[in-house]
Image: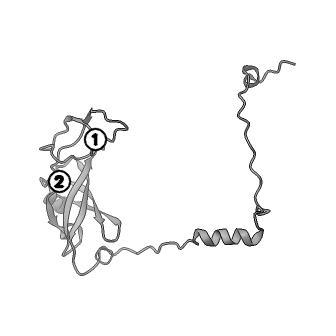
Amino acid sequence: MEFKVVISDQESGRSYQREIKDEKAARLRNLKIGDEFDGSIVGLTGYTLKITGGSDKSGFPMKKGVHGTQKPRILMRSGVGYKPRRDVRKRKRVRGERIDEDIVQINTKVVKRAKKSIVELLGLKVEEKKTETPVKEKKEEIKEKGAGEKPSDEKPKAKRSKAKKSKEEKDGYSSA
């Protein structure tokens, strides 16, 4: 048995992915959405994680309230697995809320924290965010080049005519 556990850290706004196999994965079997488990299973000693969802090997999402491990087709108005553009009910196939060997990904969130950060415990590198110049500074640079003038580097954009072509012009024939 093998799972990809996605850990969502709401304080930092980041998510981390860990793969667990065999004995550790077996400890998560038969847990359901909403259950909490010890983070030491995924390498986060001192953390408590809550299961928020997941998906199976075919890509069907787990849905809270669908008991067991089966894949029924349920009538849905909206929610996990169905986002309608208008108010329509539709039958959609989803996975039950219990974790079994068909589940590939388990989504979790941090409920209880330890003193060490997740980055330290997992041994990851922290990527620094690229600093971009604010929009105001960019506008000032353009004004310095010339008030209201376009920079010489840029080519003027070609305007498209909105007139419809006749059938002959589309086919490549001319009437002359």
Left or right, residue 85 beside residue 168: left
Q: Name the amino acid, label 1.
A: Ser
Mark 2–mark 1 CB contact (< 8 Å): no
Q: Position of residue 89 (x, y in %)?
A: 27, 33
Quadrant including the N terminus: bottom left
Q: Which mark is residue 78?
A: 1
Q: Residues within 10 Å of mark 1 (few under 14, many from 20)?
A: some
Is 13 left, or right, of 25 in this rendering? right
Using the image as rendered, state which of residue 17 and residue 108 is in the foreground. 108
Q: Determine the residue positioned at 76% across, 61% down.
A: 150
**Element type at marker 1?**
loop
Q: Left or right: 153 with respect to 136?
A: right
At 33% from the left edge and 42% from the top edge, which residue is drawn? 83
Q: Quick check: 8 above or below 75?
A: below
- Say which amino acid is labelled 2: Ile
Residue lying furthest bottom: 115
- Depth order, front residue of 49/57: 49
Label 2 and label 1: CA atoms lie apart by: 18 Å
Relative height, residue 152 to residue 158 (above, below): below
- Numbered disc in front, either 2 or 1: 1
Q: Position of residue 49 (x, y in %)?
A: 20, 65
Q: In the image, residue 105 lies at what x, y percent? A: 27, 53
Taking the view exactly as shown, the residue that stands out farthest to the right is 176
Question: Residue beneath label 2, please?
Answer: 33
Q: Locate the C terminus by quadrant.
A: top right
- Report the residue that reaches farthest toward the top: 175
Q: Earlier in the sequence, mark 2 or mark 1?
A: 2
